[in-house]
Image: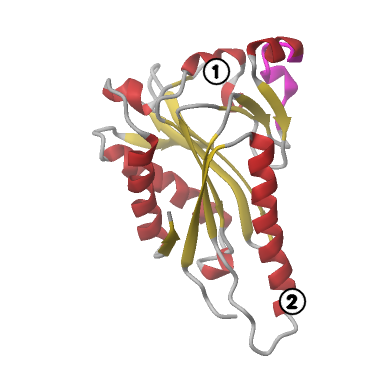
Amino acid sequence: MGINKTIKIIDLGFMSYSESLEKQETYFDEIIALKRLNRNKANPVPTHNYLLWVEHPPVFTIGKSGKMEHLLVGKESLAEKGIEFFQTNRGGDITFHGPGQLVAYPIFDLDNFFTDIHKYLRFLEEAVILTLKEYGLHATRSQGETGVWLEVGTPFARKICAMGVRASRWVTMHGLALNVTTDLSYFDHIVPCGIQGKGVTSLSKEVGREISLEEVKEKLKIHLGNLFEANWVGA
């Protein structure tokens, strides 16, 4: 099969979680269908790769392995607070998406890059770590806890970026959520990612100033492109 290392960027803007999930599934299903067709072709057609940017209204999502007791308020209370709740098919536990958070959904055919989910997750983390470094932050991984953290191994450990992915036939969906100017009080209603006793933070809180999502997108895009050795088309 021909290798395609071009990634098309699609900026969904401000969109509900459920609507953006439908968008993801459309691109995901398109790639899977083409891969099935390619199995019987002498000259297979290269598959596409997509990166969706999106910002969500307030929503809690829980992954396949998530525990409902990590939601600390009732669903009626959520409705009163204007927060949606969504059970999804990604990995991981419960997390929050909302305004001021940069969400990236890579829908990549890893046959175009490398067939290693562990390496894929580490590359997503590394792109965020390098982005945060540009703001003077020393972010790291926390062993056994997917995502990006500050001050790991101290009583002040706090998560700044959550991750959860799904993959089938080496095609990925879901992705990462980086807190940029996020209202962190929403996290008081959950045990974020099922991890007890550790806090959450945002980029703007750490650097003490407002930062635009557009600025962070550009930096993150560069680091993702370098790591995946990819070319970009679109926004």
The residue at 47%/18% (across/down) is 183
* Residue 143 seen from this side: no
Check the picture and name the quadrant holding the C terminus: bottom left
Look at the numbered disc 1 and give the secondary structure of its residue: helix
Location of residue 31 in the rendering, given as x and y in whole percent from the top left corner: 66, 65
Q: Which residue is mark 2?
A: 37
Check the picture and name the quadrant holding the N terminus: bottom right
Contact (CB < 8 A) between labels 2 and 1? no
Q: Which residues are magenta?
A: 66-75
- In the rendered image, which quarter is residue 216 located in? top left
Instruction: State the residue in front, 113 or 85.
Output: 85
Q: Earlier in the sequence, mark 2 or mark 1?
A: 2
The residue at 43%/23% (across/down) is 158
The residue at 58%/27% (across/down) is 57
Location of residue 102 in the rendering, given as x and y in whole percent from the top left corner: 46, 36
The residue under label 1 is which amino acid type? Answer: Phe
Q: Nearer the viewer, mark 2 or mark 1?
A: 2
Image disc number at residue 107: none
The residue under label 2 is which amino acid type? Answer: Leu
Instruction: State the residue in front, 184 or 133.
Output: 184
Look at the numbered disc 2 and give the secondary structure of its residue: helix
Q: Is residue 142 magenta?
A: no
* Residues packed near mark 2 inside 10 Å, few (<14), some (14 to 19) or many (20 plus): few
What is the CA distance from the residue labelled 2 to the residue labelled 1?
44 Å
Instruction: State the residue in front, 100 or 123.
Output: 100
- In the rendered image, which quarter is residue 45 located in? bottom right
Per the picture, the main secondary structure of the magenta-coloured stretch is loop
* Residue 82 seen from this side: yes
Q: Which residue is mark 1?
A: 187
Determine whether 41 is above or below 19 in the image: below
* Residues packed near mark 1 inside 10 Å, few (<14), some (14 to 19) or many (20 plus): some
